[in-house]
Amino acid sequence: MATVLAADLGGTKTLVRLVRTASDGPVQETLFERRYESGDFPSMDAVLSAFFEAASERGLTAAPNSACLAVAGPVTDHGAHQTAKVTNLPWQLASDKLQRDFGIARVRLVNDFVAVGYGVAAWSRRDDVVVYTGEENAERVAPRVVLGAGTGLGVCQIFYGDRASPLVCASEGGHMDFAAQNDQQYRFRRFLSERYGHVSYDRVVCGSGIRDAFLFFAKEAGKEQDEAVQRIVASDNPAAAISAAYSENALCQAAIGLFFEIYGAMAGNLALLALPFGGVFLAGGIAPKLREQLQSSRFVPCYLDKGRLSYIVERIPVFLIQDTSTGLAGAAYIAARGA
């Protein structure tokens, strides 16, 4: 048995968990867990200091045997150590520094969607929602793709070796150029380009993308200065405010509808890229909260609309992951394997 630390670092929130695991990796028991608002801390070191202080108050004073930190951003290997920068935060991490500062024998940094990928690959997905069934049942050991909208858009691919053991490949595919598909999306892309310059899917398929879509439709309707529009934009979480006003506000409906159209098209692009006959999995914090809007949206038609190769995508099912701690579970799995 070993005690390992798992952390999932996002632009909005950071989850940290201590778990006791068996030697082969499966999690046996969660010992302690905390959620922190990422913007409240200057660094990951500060988060871990707060976490270990809280854990010690519960009598958990021993340093974990190993740790895995899943980072919402690219990870770079430098021989024996790793560095990472969180894309939507001014946090920079170095595995060897974390090892020294917190007395952990081994710290591994991975892209956050690598951790999500291991969470998807290592456990059966009984609670997932079928968004699109495909023309045939998903193959258990066929490749899979995971993408998820939150503060940004994460992507990973899962492949299987000869013994059906998963290999999760990191990706920054969310930062591919956004490709508009119709006149409305061309206008939206121009609107974003004037604000930000480069426009990627990561800019569009995320919480701030929902806010920008809302502002786009408000501008087209000549309602940018309306009190209701200004109140939503000025709120602490505009995407959540847009979701809350969805049933009675046409601009909110249009914004979320456009969000899911583009989300579906991107999912279809990745289906063509990886041919993931094991399924496309939607992770991240947004879609589970907007499950009803997802299922009534044009996500599936846009997912399938791939011209001459639509028949390929039609075979590939899409699942919604409802468990938003899948990345944390995957990080624990990775840490346990290296303990």
Image: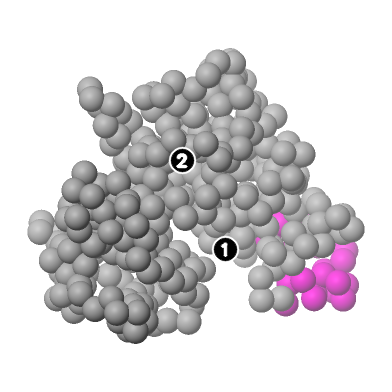
Q: What residue is at 19 percent from the left and 48 percent from the top?
A: 23
The answer to whether 203 appears left or right of 63 in the picture is right
Mark 2 = which residue? 146
Q: CA distance from mark 1 to mark 2?
A: 27 Å
x and y percent of residue 63 in the render? 20, 73
Left or right: 100 in relation to 88: left
Magenta stretch, residue numbers: 212-234
- Quadrant occupied by the N terminus: bottom left
Q: Main secondary structure of the magenta part?
A: helix
Q: Is residue 239 magenta?
A: no
Label disc, if present, on residue 196 of the rendered structure: 1
Q: Position of residue 338 (x, y in %)?
A: 18, 52
Q: Is residue 278 among what the camera can see?
A: yes
Give SS at disc 1: helix
The x and y percentages for residue 194 are 63, 61
Asked if residue 41 lies left or right of residue 102, the reply is: right
At label 2, which amino acid type do we have?
Val
Q: Nearer the viewer, residue 35 or 181?
A: 35
The front one of 72 and 8 is 8
Residue drawn at point x = 68 percent, y = 46 percent: 291
Element at label 2: strand
Q: Is residue 222 magenta?
A: yes
Q: Residues within 10 Å of mark 2 (few under 14, many from 20)?
A: many
Quarter-of-image position of residue 29: bottom left
Picture quadrant where residue 85 is located = bottom left
Marked residue nearer the N-terminal end (1 or 2): 2
Q: Nearer the viewer, residue 291 or 183?
A: 291
Query: In this view of the protein, can residue 277 be seen by the observer?
Result: no
Residue under the point 77% across and 71% down: 232
